[in-house]
Image: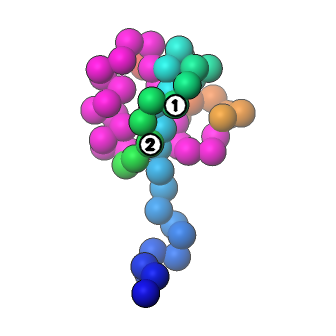
Amino acid sequence: MGCSCGHKRRLWEVVADGGSGKVLFTGSKATADAVSKRYGNSVVREKGTAGRPPATPL
């Protein structure tokens, strides 16, 4: 049986090199914020927003 979230779950990515590097982590916003603190010059952005500016510049 499928979930009842209606595909509204938002995923966040931690991306290296100020948003132009590889994706280091994908998960919830809170966990992505915590993971991004471990990597210098990383950014947290909503998954699938590669062409847009980062959601949270660090």
The spot of residue 47 in percent (x, y) is 56, 45
Query: Residue under circle 2?
Result: 26
- Amino acid bearing label 2: Thr
Specify few, some or many for label 1: CA neighbours under 10 Å numbering under 14, 14-19, or 20 or more.
some
The spot of residue 57 in percent (x, y) is 48, 23
Q: Please, is residue 33 above or below residue 1 in the view? A: above
- Residue sitting farthest toward the bottom: 1
| Quadrant of the rendering where the C terminus is positioned | top left
- Amino acid bearing label 1: Val
Disc on res. 53: none
Question: Would residue 54 appear left or right of 26 to someone viewing this image?
Answer: right
Question: Would residue 42 appear left or right of 35 to someone viewing this image?
Answer: right
Query: Residue under circle 1?
Result: 23
Q: How many badges with numbers are in the image?
A: 2
Q: Please, is residue 2 above or below residue 56 in the view? A: below
Circles 1, 2 touching at the beta carbon (< 8 Å): yes
Residue 53 location, quadrant: top right
Q: Which residues are magenta?
A: 29-49
The spot of residue 32 in percent (x, y) is 36, 37
Nearest the camera: 28 or 21? 21
Q: Is residue 21 visible?
A: yes
Look at the image and say whether residue 21 sits in the magenta stretch.
no
Q: How is the image coloured?
A: rainbow
Question: Would residue 52 appear left or right of 57 to someone viewing this image?
Answer: right
Q: Is residue 57 visible?
A: no
Q: Secondary structure at mark 1?
A: strand
Residue that appears at 52% across and 31% down? 23
Residue 29 location, quadrant: top left
